[in-house]
């Protein structure tokens, strides 16, 4: 068995964090609309019927008041500049509020209204009346409608009548006494404001006189002087920073020279290449003269070496003289270096003192400019504060004058209103129709229907969120990162005969959509991802019974055989074997007999009608076979089968029901998990994948089986497009085929005459 798998296949077993499940509105409507409609109807029908009979019919009584605009036009006197017009709409809205408040309270004081049973039975009759009596202004009109609704027609008319009468009385009494009191209050306020305005104007005049010409100086000269001072301050800051930098640099140079002098004193005549010391040594007069003597002695020594022998006393004397001159030259250079360093140090100290003095002068100059700027800013700020206070007083004086003008205008309006006509009249007398209104019942029915629809939507949403059944590829995407290899449609919707055996679709209907989906699985086995070896052994399993794993395994095995591959279909479902029955074979020798040594693999396999496909069942001793799934003999048997066949397809029991698949999964090249739509829950499939992964299985993908198209989905259209894809011929080709009743693909004959038959059949998964 090969172990050369790609990184993609090996990474499938990595832990997968399931994404947060979201609700698709389209899927919610397609899948749950019957439930939502049923819940809505179940709630709406009885509640609407009950509310219709429980709610009593009511009479709508009403009256109309007209608030005349000509009253407000009288208040506007064009000949007087301080006359103003009031806000008409605000006035009418205020009066409507009075009707719903104090006027209704006066209505309740009437014994006829207060003692009526419909009013008296209320816990708070006043609050009930204030909420029931409505005074609404008609848009863009002078009319206000007063309405009241009650089961008793006479009571409704009486309440509206009393409301109109009490409001007219209240308005008349209020207008008669409000004018005198309001005018006296306004006159007192006018006199008080005039006194305050005179005092404020006196303070303004005094403030202007105290400022004098300072305001002009602030506006003209002080600003330019302040800006010039700020420019000079910026220049002084730059000069101070430059002087401080130069002083710091000079101090650093002094420290370096002092350190150099100390190290030179401690050294033994080393050369010094900093600060031009060696250049000064080379130009020293004593060093130059001593160097000339060295040259003379070197020349004399050379002549002596040519004249005398190597051990001659004269030669030794000459060498001693040469060494003596060399010593003098070294002393001269050392003295010259010390002198050069000391001279540079003194000069650096002088420069540092000068730089320090210049830095201190720059600091004093900067502080001088800063003090001048602060003085100018303080003076400018003082003048600005004084000017701002003066401006504030002037604005306050203008506001007082405006308020005084308004007060005088109000007094004038009151004087004019005393001679104005009435501002309100009854436009329509209180009246109630002879028939009661059904509006309340209709409103309750509409509200109940809306609530029922909301309850239906909530029920569908809850059912969608709590539905754990696998129904679509999207449901599998929440469980694993393993690829979905195929989506096999239900045979009812695949334009197949009603009596078709799903396990033999590849043999009987190779041109169907289901067969094409099985070939997709075949492609993953024969042509794995780049970098992977072809899968020799593949195990098919599922989470539970009814998912269709045996059907998928048989069809994939037939597809491999049709691709000229030599295939062995191995059935290890000892408790419930089906593979031999599917291919029309009786139960014969199998795994049990091989493990007992009664037969061999080659002698036990049996050929099928599909060329290249052999079948091996579990044998007769079921209990013995189950106990051998973890044995070395089974591993050796699989290795022998892989050497004799191109592919070994293994049909195993459901992994959650039995441990057979978990024991065999680690020793095969790949595992395919088959899930039936509407058969296994998400938790079962997730547990199945986790168990297989923990056992070391290489899950190469999943197959979703028995998928049904949903209303509004694309699956039904895709099925139709699949079968019509090859039938789009020209008119000539179609005419030629009319007389030919033969067809290489038998499923093409089922396009028009099998819908009714297929709807009555159900696929029986194995």
Image (cartoon, rainbow, N blue to C red):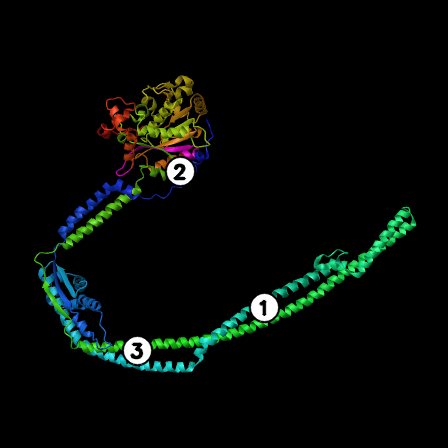
Can you see residue 468?
yes
In the image, 364: left or right of 141? Answer: right
The quadrant where residue 515 appears: top left
Disc 1 designates what residue?
Answer: 240
The quadrant where residue 645 appears: top left
In the image, 735: left or right of 622? Answer: left
Q: How far is mark 1 from mark 3, CA to CA? A: 58 Å
Of badges 2 and 1, nearer the viewer stands 1
In the image, 667: left or right of 100? Answer: right
Where residue 204 is drawn, which disc sits there?
none
Q: How far is mark 2 from mark 3, CA to CA? A: 80 Å
Q: How far is mark 2 from mark 1, CA to CA? A: 71 Å
- Residue 134, percent across and down? 17, 62
Q: Is residue 537 above or below residue 115?
A: above
- Residue 499, percent across and down? 25, 25
Disc 2 designates what residue?
Answer: 481
- Reply yes or no: does residue 555 show up in magenta: no
Mark 2 crowdedness (10 Å alpha carbons): few <14, some 14-19, many ≥20: some
Of helix, strand and loop, which one carries label 3?
Answer: helix
Q: Which residues are magenta?
A: 692-713
- Reply yes or no: does residue 702 show up in magenta: yes
- Residue 447, percent across and down? 20, 52
Disc 3 designates what residue?
Answer: 401
The quadrant where residue 684 appears: top left
């Amino acid at each position: 068995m090969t172990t050369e798998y790609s990184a993609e296949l090996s990474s499938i077993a990595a832990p997968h964090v399931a994404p947060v499940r979201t609700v698709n509105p389209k899927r919610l409507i397609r899948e749950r609309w019957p439930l939502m409609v049923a819940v809505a109807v179940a709630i709406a029908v009885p509640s609407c019927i009950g509310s219709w009979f429980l709610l009593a019919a009511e009479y709508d009584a009403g009256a109309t008041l007209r608030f005349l605009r000509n009253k407000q036009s009288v208040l506007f006197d064009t000949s007087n500049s301080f006359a103003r017009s009031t806000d008409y709409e605000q006035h009418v809205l205020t009066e409507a509020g009075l009707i719903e408040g104090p006027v209704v309270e006066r209505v309740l004081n009437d014994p006829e209204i207060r003692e009526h049973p419909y009013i008296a039975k209320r816990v708070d009759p006043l609050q009930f009346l204030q909420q029931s009596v409505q005074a609404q202004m008609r848009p863009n009109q002078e009319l206000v409608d007063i309405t009241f609704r009650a089961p008793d027609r006479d009571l409704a008319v009486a309440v509206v009548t009393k409301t109109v009468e009490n409001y007219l009385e209240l308005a008349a009494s209020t207008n008669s006494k409000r004018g005198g009191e309001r005018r006296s209050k306004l006159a007192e306020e006018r006199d008080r404001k005039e006194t305050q305005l005179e005092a404020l104007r006196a303070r303004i005049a005094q403030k202007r006189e105290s400022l004098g010409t300072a305001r002009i100086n602030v506006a003209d000269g002080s600003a330019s002087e302040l800006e010039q001072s700020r420019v000079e301050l910026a220049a002084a800051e730059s000069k101070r920073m430059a002087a401080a930098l130069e002083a710091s640099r000079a101090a650093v140079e002094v420290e370096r020279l002092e350190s150099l002098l100390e190290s030179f004193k401690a050294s033994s005549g080393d050369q010094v290449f900093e600060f031009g010391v060696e250049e000064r040594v080379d130009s020293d007069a004593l060093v130059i003269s001593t160097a000339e003597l060295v040259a003379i002695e070197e020349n004399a020594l050379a002549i002596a070496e040519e004249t005398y022998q190597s051990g001659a006393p004269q030669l030794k004397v000459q060498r001693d003289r040469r060494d003596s001159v060399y010593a003098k030259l070294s002393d001269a250079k050392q003295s010259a270096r010390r002198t050069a360093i000391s001279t540079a140090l003194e000069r650096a100290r002088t420069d540092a003192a000068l730089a320090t003095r210049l830095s201190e002068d720059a600091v004093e100059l900067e502080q001088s400019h800063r003090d001048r700027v602060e003085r100018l800013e303080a003076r400018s700020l003082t003048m600005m504060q004084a000017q701002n206070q003066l401006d504030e007083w002037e604005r306050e004086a203008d506001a007082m004058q405006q308020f005084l003008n308004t007060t005088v205008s109000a007094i004038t309006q009151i004087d004019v209103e005393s001679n104005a006509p009435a501002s309100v009249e009854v436009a329509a007398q209180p009246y109630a129709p002879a028939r009661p209104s059904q509006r309340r019942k209709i409103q309750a029915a509409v509200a109940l229907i809306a609530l029922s629809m909301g309850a239906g939507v909530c029920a569908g949403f809850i059912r969608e969120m709590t539905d754990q059944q696998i129904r679509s590829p999207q449901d599998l995407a929440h469980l694993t990162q393993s690829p979905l290899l195929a989506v096999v449609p239900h045979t009812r919707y695949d334009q197949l005969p009603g009596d078709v055996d799903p396990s033999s679709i590849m043999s009987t209907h190779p041109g169907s959509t289901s067969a094409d989906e099985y070939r997709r699985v075949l492609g993953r086995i024969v042509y794995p991802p780049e970098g992977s070896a072809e899968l020799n052994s593949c195990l098919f399993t599922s989470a539970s019974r009814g998912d269709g794993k045996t059907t998928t395994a048989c069809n994939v095995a037939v597809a491999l055989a049709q691709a000229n591959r030599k295939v062995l279909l191995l059935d290890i479902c000892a408790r419930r074997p089906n593979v031999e029955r599917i291919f029309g074979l009786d139960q014969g020798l199998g795994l049990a007999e091989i493990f007992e040594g009664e037969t061999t693999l080659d002698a036990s396999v049996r050929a099928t009608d599909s060329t290249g496909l052999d079948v091996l069942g579990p044998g007769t001793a079921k209990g013995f076979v189950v106990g051998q799934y973890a044995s070395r003999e089974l591993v050796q048997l699989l290795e022998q089968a892989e050497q004799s066949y191109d592919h070994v397809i293994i049909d195993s029991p459901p992994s959650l029901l039995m441990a057979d698949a978990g024991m065999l999964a680690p020793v095969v090249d790949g595992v395919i998990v088959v899930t039936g739509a509407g058969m296994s829950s998400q938790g079962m499939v997730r547990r199945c994948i986790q168990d297989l992964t923990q056992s070391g299985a290489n899950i190469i993908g999943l197959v979703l089986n028995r998928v049904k198209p949903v209303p509004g989905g694309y699956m039904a259209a895709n099925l139709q497009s699949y079968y019509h894809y090859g039938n789009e011929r020209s008119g000539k080709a179609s005419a030629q085929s009319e007389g030919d009743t033969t067809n290489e693909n038998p499923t093409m004959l089922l396009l028009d005459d099998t819908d009714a038959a297929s709807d009555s059949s159900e696929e029986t998964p194995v």
